[in-house]
Structures are given as C-alpha cells and as structure tokens.
Image (spheres, rainbow, N blue to C red):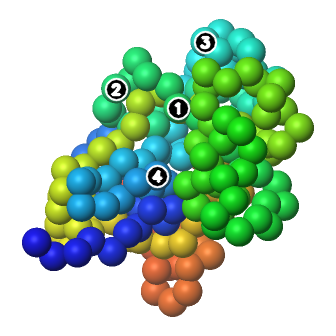
C-alpha cells in the first residue's frame, strides 16, 4: 500500500465540474486525512437553525452568523465544533487549552462536552457543524485526480468567515495564477 500524504488542515474547494449537489461550491476543511480515509466539514453551508436553539450553553461563543452549519451529508444528527485559538504561537507539541484539540495551526476541534466557561477566555469565534463529509481510503485522491476538487492552504479566518456565502469565491480569488480566475465562474454557466 502506498503512503498517503496528509492533507489535514487544507481546504478542498469544489471545482465547477463537481456534479454532487451536496458539494456545489463547497469549501471543506479537512480535519483528518490518512490511510484510513478522510473527514472534513463544509465551511460555507449555514442553516437557519440558531446555535442557541440546539446548544444554548455555547451560543455566546459562536461567531457570526450564530447559526449551525451543515458540515456535510454524513451524520446530520451529530455536532462538532471548530474554533481558532487567537495568537496561538505554541509549538505543534503543545496541546492548547483543555477541551480543544489542534487540527492545524491555530484551528482546532472543541469538545462540546466540556463546560463552555472553561474555554471562553481562550477561544476565538466558535462554529458548530451538524454532520460532516467523509471519504473512504483513496476516494478523495480519485476525486482530486478527476478534477472535482482544488486542494489549497487554509487560513484561520476561513473557519469563521462572517460571510460564508462568499467563501468559495474568496478562497479561489486569493490563489495564484489560473486558479484565481475560477472565482469568476458564473453561478449558472448556461446564462453566458
């Protein structure tokens, strides 16, 4: 078996060629990518559900918009949370605050079983996701090879983008070369 180069912490940006409606113009942060498969959350799918309606103790820490995001089509009845630890200049070996697990750089998963007040002073804005996106071993690599996804670097601000509906274009626009031009791709190419 060939070794998998980890894409953990990177973004998958749906190409216009991706036909799956679950991922149309999706920006996915990869939380785990190894020989066992891949797990991530879609960063730009806000729902109308207020965080306070489902996880009231965490509502005050949630960033704007203060809604639950659909993290992907898998396990929509489960929740996970991401938060950035501002100014986190600790080494990769430092686990960070109790109740937070580093995914990449200053971005980490929050233990929703922990008391929110334990983390309140440490966290930047929090984002809650219902469900996640998952790929079996080798599946993501196949999809990237077929041109369904662009793999790009993430930035801490991607997790808490205040205008998630513009994240797809914003992430593409900051890329170099021809990839930045994809940001101008029309929502409905048949209208060109």
Q: Which residue is mark 2?
A: 75
Looking at the rendered image, the disc whose residue lies closer to the viewer, 4 or 3, is: 4
Badge 4: residue crowd in 10 Å (few <14, some 14–19, many ≥20): many
Quadrant that contains the C terminus: bottom left
Q: Which residue is mark 4?
A: 31
Q: Residue at x 55, y 26 (%)?
A: 47
Disc 4 to disc 1, C-alpha distance: 11 Å
Q: Earlier in the sequence, mark 3 or mark 1?
A: 3
Nearest the eye: 176 or 151: 151
Q: Which mark is residue 13?
A: none
Q: Which mark is residue 54?
A: 3
Dot 3 falls on a residue whose secondary structure is helix
| Outermost residue, bottom side | 177
Disc 2 to disc 1, C-alpha distance: 11 Å
The answer to which quarter of the image holds residue 167 is bottom right
Q: Position of residue 32 (x, y in %)?
A: 41, 54
- Vertical side of 55 occupied by 184: above or below: below
Q: Which residue is mark 1?
A: 80
Nearest the eye: 74 or 91: 91
Dot 4 falls on a residue whose secondary structure is strand
Q: Position of residue 80 (x, y in %)?
A: 53, 32
Q: Earlier in the sequence, mark 2 or mark 4?
A: 4
Disc 3 to disc 2, C-alpha distance: 16 Å
Nearest the eye: 134 or 25: 134
Q: Earlier in the sequence, mark 4 or mark 1?
A: 4
């Amino acid at each position: 078996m060939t070794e998998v180069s980890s894409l953990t912490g990177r973004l998958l940006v749906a190409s216009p060629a991706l036909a799956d409606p679950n991922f149309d113009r999706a920006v996915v942060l990869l939380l785990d990518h190894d020989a066992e498969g891949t797990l991530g959350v879609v960063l730009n799918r806000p729902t109308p559900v207020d965080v306070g309606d489902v996880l009231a103790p965490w509502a005050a820490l949630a960033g704007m918009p203060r809604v639950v995001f659909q993290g992907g089509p898998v396990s929509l009845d489960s929740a996970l949370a991401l938060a950035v630890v501002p100014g986190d200049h600790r080494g990769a070996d430092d686990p960070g605050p109790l109740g937070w697990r580093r995914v990449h750089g200053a971005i980490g998963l929050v233990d929703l079983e922990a008391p929110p007040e334990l983390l309140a002073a440490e966290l930047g804005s929090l984002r809650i996701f219902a469900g996640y996106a998952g790929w079996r071993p080798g599946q993501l690599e196949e999809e990237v090879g077929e041109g369904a996804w662009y793999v790009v670097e993430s930035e801490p601000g991607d997790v808490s983008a205040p205008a998630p509906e513009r994240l797809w274009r914003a992430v593409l626009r900051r890329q170099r070369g021809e990839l930045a031009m994809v940001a101008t791709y029309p929502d409905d190419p048949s209208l060109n």
